[in-house]
Image (cartoon, rainbow, N blue to C red):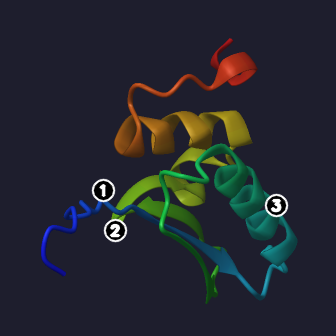
Amino acid sequence: MVGAPRMTTPHTHRVQIEYCTQCRWLPRAAWLAQELLTTFETELTELALKPGTGGVFVVRVDDEVVWDRREQGFPEPTAVKRLVRDRVAPEKSLGHSER
């Protein structure tokens, strides 16, 4: 269209939560996904739940592992929110989660 302003696309961010189906960790993964989508509703373009096996519970941001249950235990949502925020919106305040 002549004279139409060009729309710029902000950087897109994808979060993936891989969880163990054998351990029945889908509810935990879904709850964490809900927390992240609520907090970063404008910063994320996709949040995927990936079924896995063998006790896996891994959170990735743009294919970078930010939390691995095998190394760090199960995450508190505030810890994951901080790690995601640092990668997708460093200037964003997490409000009461910052304390």
Task: Please rate how many residues cluster around mark 2, counting C-alpha atoms within 10 Å: few if below 14, some from 14 to 19, many from 20.
Answer: few
- Residue at 68% over, 11% down: 99
Please tell me which of labels 3 and 1 falls first in the chain.
1
Look at the picture and state if 60 lies above or below 91. Answer: below
- Say which amino acid is labelled 2: Asp
Foreground of the two, 97 or 29? 97
Residue 25 % position (x, y): 80, 73
Query: What distance separates the C-alpha of mark 3 from that of mark 1?
Result: 27 Å
Residue 34 % position (x, y): 76, 59
- Which residue bears the numbered disc 3? 31
Residue 15 % position (x, y): 49, 65
- Say which amino acid is labelled 3: Trp
Please give the count of numbered marks on the rendered protein.
Answer: 3
SS assignment at label 2: loop
Please tell me which of labels 1 and 2 falls first in the chain.
1
Q: Quadrant of the N terminus?
A: bottom left
Q: Are marks 1 and 2 in contact (CB under 8 Å)?
A: no
Look at the picture and state if 43 lies above or below 54. Answer: above
Look at the picture and state if 89 lies above or below 26. Answer: above
Query: What distance separates the C-alpha of mark 1 from that of mark 2?
Result: 18 Å
Q: Are marks 2 and 3 in contact (CB under 8 Å)?
A: no
Residue 18 tag number? none
- Say which amino acid is labelled 1: Pro
- Which residue bears the numbered disc 1? 10
- Which residue of the protein is positioned furthest toward the front in this rendering? 3
SS assignment at label 1: loop
Residue 63 tag number? 2
